[in-house]
């Protein structure tokens, strides 16, 4: 059995000289390697023919974090806090999710990936949680805080794949998002939520490994539960390698 190739979606940014670059935080790469996988960047500039060709070579996919999804894609309420809409990335990730939802290749969706999974499969989002959920928990941690800061607890559903992997009913997690899942796709099962009721975990039913989390496990590399999550994902991908 060879090392599994793990595709990781990426966004756009600019370097200090204003030149365009592919943007992917190294923590996704490090966590994939630590779990035994070989990371491969999936640039959003790929045509459908291009990503379909790349997909045939991959053993699993991580839908990474990033900027906001275009609210027009889910009938979302406009809000001034919406930022960084990347139409190219939306246009690649949504059909890729449709393809993976009907395939058996493992995927792990994180933060933006968690949200785009729900949108792609017919769900909706809160476009700014703190304005749309009264007395919501602290979900959008200030940028001057460490990325592994524990923002709030989550409750994990007992009968879920996530509970089986993380091995804890309650987990303290970081939180770096201002949007959140509102109406859950009928194809997804809720597996975790925060104290204010916001959905924090989902899984695709009748799929070997289709897990999505709202927090950032890649920023908590020393946490045993987060290591277990990446290891379980990469181990599932090995079955395709």
Image (cartoon, rainbow, N blue to C red):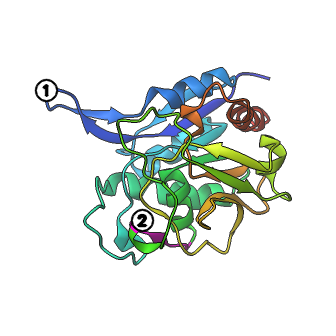
Numbered tag placed on residue 207 in the rendering: none
Residue at (63%, 61%) from the top-left corner? 195
Q: Look at the image and give the residue range highlighted in magenta.
A: 122-130
**Quarter residue 5 falls in:** top right
Q: Where is residue 83 in the image (x, y as percent from the top left)?
A: 28, 56
Reading the image, the residue beneath label 2 is 130
Q: From the viewer's side, name the closer residue of 211 and 198.
A: 198
Q: Is residue 80 left or right of residue 174?
A: left
Residue at (29%, 61%) from the top-left corner? 81
Residue at (53%, 33%) from the top-left corner? 148
Mark 1 element type:
loop
Q: Are marks 1 and 2 in contact (CB under 8 Å)?
A: no
Q: From the viewer's side, name the closer residue of 99 and 137.
A: 137
Which label sits in the foreground, 1 or 2? 2
Q: Where is residue 108 in the image (x, y as percent from the top left)?
A: 63, 45
Binning the other alpha carbons within 10 Å of mark 1 as few (below 14), some (14 to 19) or many (20 upward) gives few
Q: In this view, does 94 lie to the left or right of 198?
A: left
Q: Position of residue 172 (x, y in %)?
A: 65, 44
Residue 141 appears in the figure: yes
Numbered tag placed on residue 17 in the rendering: 1
Q: In this view, does 128 lie to the left or right of 169?
A: left
Q: How far apart are marks 1 and 2 (CA)?
A: 35 Å
């Amino acid at each position: 059995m060879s090392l599994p190739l793990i595709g990781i979606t990426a966004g756009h940014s600019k370097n200090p000289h204003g030149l365009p670059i592919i943007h992917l935080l190294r923590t996704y790469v490090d966590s994939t390697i630590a779990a035994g996988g070989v990371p491969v960047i999936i640039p959003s500039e790929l045509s459908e023919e291009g990503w379909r060709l790349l997909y045939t070579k991959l053993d699993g996919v991580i839908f990474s974090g990033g900027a906001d999804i275009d609210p027009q894609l889910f009938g979302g309420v406009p809000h001034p806090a919406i930022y960084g809409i990347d139409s190219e990335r939306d246009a690649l990730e949504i059909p890729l999710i449709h393809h993976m939802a009907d395939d058996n290749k493992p995927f792990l969706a994180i933060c933006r990936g968690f949200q785009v999974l729900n949108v792609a499969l017919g769900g909706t989002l809160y476009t700014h949680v703190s304005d749309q959920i009264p007395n919501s928990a602290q979900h959008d941690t200030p940028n001057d805080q460490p990325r592994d800061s524990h923002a709030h607890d989550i409750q994990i559903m007992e009968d879920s794949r996530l509970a089986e992997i993380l091995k804890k009913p309650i987990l303290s997690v970081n939180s770096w998002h201002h949007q959140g899942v509102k109406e859950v796709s009928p194809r997804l099962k809720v597996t975790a939520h925060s104290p204010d009721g916001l959905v924090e975990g989902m899984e695709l039913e009748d799929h070997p490994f289709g897990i999505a989390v709202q927090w950032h496990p890649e920023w908590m590399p020393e946490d045993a539960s987060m290591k277990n999550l990446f290891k379980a994902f990469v181990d599932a991908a090995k079955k395709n390698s």
